[in-house]
Image (cartoon, rainbow, N blue to C red):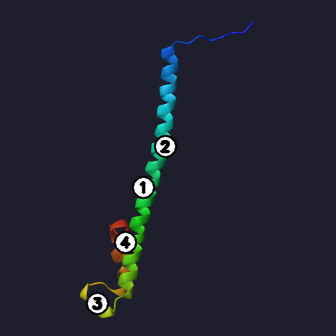
Amino acid sequence: MAYQEITSASAVLNREIAATRNFFSRIADGLARAGNAISQASVARRRFELVQALQAKSDVELEALNIKRDDIVHHVFKDLFYI
C-alpha cells in the first residue's frame, strides 16, 4: 500500500514562495558582494594612480604641496592606516 501525503494548496504555495525568496536573496547577496568588490577595486586603482602621479612630480612640485617624496604613500593612504 502506497502512502501519499496530502498537503493543502496553501502549504505548497508557502513552500514555493519561501524557496523563491531564498533563491533571489542569494542572488541579491552575490550581486551586492560583486558590487562592493568592484567599488573597492575602483578606489584602490584611483589611489594607486595618485601615488604614481605624485611620484612623477619633481621635488619642487612636491615641496609646493608640502609632501616629501618619502611620505607620498603615507599621504595617499593616511585615512586608512594612519588615524
Image vertical order of residue 62 relative to residue 45, above or below: below
Mark 4 or mark 3: whose residue is earlier in sequence? 3
Residue 23, percent across and down?
Answer: 51, 36
Measured in 3D between alpha carbons, the distance from the residue under mark 2 to the one under mark 3, in whole angstroms, is: 49 Å
Dividing the picture into quadrants, the one containing residue 54 is bottom left
Which three-letter amino acid code belongs to the residue tagged 1? Asn
How would you rate the neighbour count of disc 4 (Cα within 10 Å): few for under 14, some for 14-19, many for 20 or more?
some
Image vertical order of residue 29 relative to residue 10, above or below: below
How would you rate the neighbour count of disc 2 (Cα within 10 Å): few for under 14, some for 14-19, many for 20 or more?
few
Does the CB distance between marks 3 and 1 fall below 8 Å? no
Residue 26, percent across and down?
Answer: 49, 41
Tell us which disc is closer to us: 4 or 3: 3
Mark identifier at residue 15: none
Q: Nearer the viewer, residue 3 or 74?
A: 3
Measured in 3D between alpha carbons, the distance from the residue under mark 3 to the one under mark 1, in whole angstroms, is: 35 Å
Dividing the picture into quadrants, the one containing residue 48 is bottom left
Mark identifier at residue 27: 2
Which three-letter amino acid code belongs to the residue tagged 2? Ile
Which three-letter amino acid code belongs to the residue tagged 3? Glu
Mark identifier at residue 36: 1
Measured in 3D between alpha carbons, the distance from the residue under mark 1 to the one under mark 4, in whole angstroms, is: 19 Å
Please, what secondary structure does the residue beneath circle 1 have?
A: helix
- For image coordinates 38% across by 68% down, the residue present is 81
Tell us which disc is closer to us: 2 or 1: 2
- Residue, disc 3: 61
- For image coordinates 39% across by 76% down, the residue present is 49
Which three-letter amino acid code belongs to the residue tagged 4? Phe
- Residue, disc 4: 77
